[in-house]
Image (cartoon, rainbow, N blue to C red):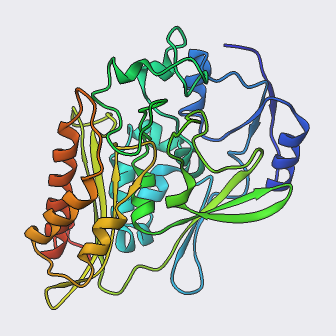
């Protein structure tokens, strides 16, 4: 591993100032992805700015009924938080579907959003990769791409975003709070990650030096139920081939509100806006759910070996939505 300097600021202001003062700096939170990439030689920061002990480690209610999650909250703690389990159940399910217990104990909310792709070409520095080394090519398109994107990819990159948590946050319309030397701003989670286009090396809309300080969840609609389901090659510790997060409110047999997002299909969590438009106001039944999912996935462009992901995602969406319409979120009975 390349030698690096280490800085531990006490506040967000000190952290962004340290970033601005050091060329080649990178923020370190739980380190569950970044340290792996440093060992592989993919990430080579000159300075690590440790933000894991900044005062952003709490989950608090906000006026209006939402929830503010500090960027340093550990994934295990967030999954077990009573407000998350009762009001944002799909988020708890998504967190528990990711990684191992040990990794969830270390990983943070901010770091989870900034995970980089697990595309094998990106992680192997002996191979070309436009995401790691722009302009070198994307061998995954003709090579091993069974796990990679079917939506929103480009000729330059077919990588997928690996986070489970971010998919659930997108379905809940969460907002990411950011801090920099220029001040504070916020971004919708659905707008936080980028499609690859001709700049696959840029994963997010973060500006240089910006620090994630928290994620805010709006209040859930009255009567809404939510669920997250993930299809993967083995029962644990595997990234999604496809996943679905859904938030659904049904009254009188008709859909009043729906938030739907797919994971494992694209360079970012894929918010299913087309499907949502078709569903709201319509019947809450499997036929309508299937038609909406198929309309959303009609723009998919699968490669040689991953066309199965389109059908897989559709079936997951239909099962999750139908279960929610029937009052089943896949979890235990809760008051």
On-image quarter of the C terminus? bottom left
Q: Is residue 79 visible?
A: yes
Q: Is residue 92 left or right of residue 252?
A: right
In the depicted view, which residue is nearer to us: 85 or 267?
267
| In the depicted structure, whether residue 178 falls above or below residue 6 | below
Q: Residue at x 47, y 33 (%)?
A: 117
Q: Is residue 124 left or right of residue 158?
A: right
Quarter of the view holding residue 251? bottom left
Q: Is residue 104 left or right of residue 295?
A: right
- How many marks overall? 0
Q: Residue at x 39, y 22 (%)?
A: 140
Which residue is outermost to the top? 126
| In the depicted structure, whether residue 271 falls above or below residue 20 | below
Q: Is residue 80 visible?
A: no
Quarter of the view holding residue 172? bottom left
On-image quarter of the N terminus? top right
| In the depicted structure, whether residue 214 falls above or below residue 126 | below
Q: Is residue 105 left or right of residue 22?
A: left
Which residue is outermost to the bottom? 252
Q: Residue 75 in the image: x percent, y percent?
A: 48, 50
Q: Residue 155 in the image: x percent, y percent?
A: 44, 31
Quarter of the view holding residue 278? bottom left
Q: Residue 205 in the image: x percent, y percent?
A: 63, 51
């Amino acid at each position: 591993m390349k030698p690096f300097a280490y800085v531990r600021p006490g506040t967000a202001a000190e952290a962004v100032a340290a970033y601005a003062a050091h060329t080649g700096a990178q923020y370190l939170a739980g380190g569950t992805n970044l340290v792996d990439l440093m060992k592989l030689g993919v990430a080579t920061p000159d300075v690590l700015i440790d933000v894991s002990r900044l005062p952003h480690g709490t989950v608090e209610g906000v006026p209006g009924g939402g929830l503010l999650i500090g960027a340093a909250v550990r994934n295990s703690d967030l999954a077990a938080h009573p407000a998350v389990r009762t009001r944002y159940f799909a988020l708890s399910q998504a967190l528990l579907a990711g990684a191992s217990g040990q990794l969830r104990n270390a990983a943070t909310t901010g770091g989870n959003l900034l995970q980089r792709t697990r595309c094998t070409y990106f992680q192997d520095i002996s191979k070309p990769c436009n995401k790691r080394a722009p302009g070198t090519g994307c061998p995954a398109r003709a090579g091993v791409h069974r796990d990679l994107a079917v939506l929103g990819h480009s000729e330059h990159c077919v990588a997928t975003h690996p986070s489970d948590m971010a998919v659930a946050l997108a379905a809940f319309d969460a907002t990411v709070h950011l801090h920099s030397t220029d001040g504070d701003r916020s971004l919708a989670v659905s707008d936080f990650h980028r499609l690859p286009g001709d700049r696959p090396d840029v994963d997010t809309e973060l500006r240089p030096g910006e620090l994630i300080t928290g994620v805010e969840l709006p209040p859930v609609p009255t009567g809404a139920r939510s669920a997250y389901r993930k299809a993967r090659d083995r029962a644990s510790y595997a990234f999604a081939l496809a996943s679905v997060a859904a938030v659904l409110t049904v009254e009188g047999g008709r859909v009043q509100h729906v938030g739907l997002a797919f994971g494992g299909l694209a360079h970012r969590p894929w918010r299913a806006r087309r499907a949502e438009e078709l569903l709201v106001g319509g019947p809450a039944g499997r036929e309508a759910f299937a038609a909406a999912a198929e309309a959303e996935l009609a723009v998919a462009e699968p490669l040689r070996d991953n066309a199965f992901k389109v059908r897989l995602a559709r079936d997951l969406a239909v099962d999750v939505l139908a279960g929610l319409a029937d009052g089943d979120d896949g979890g235990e009975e809760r008051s």
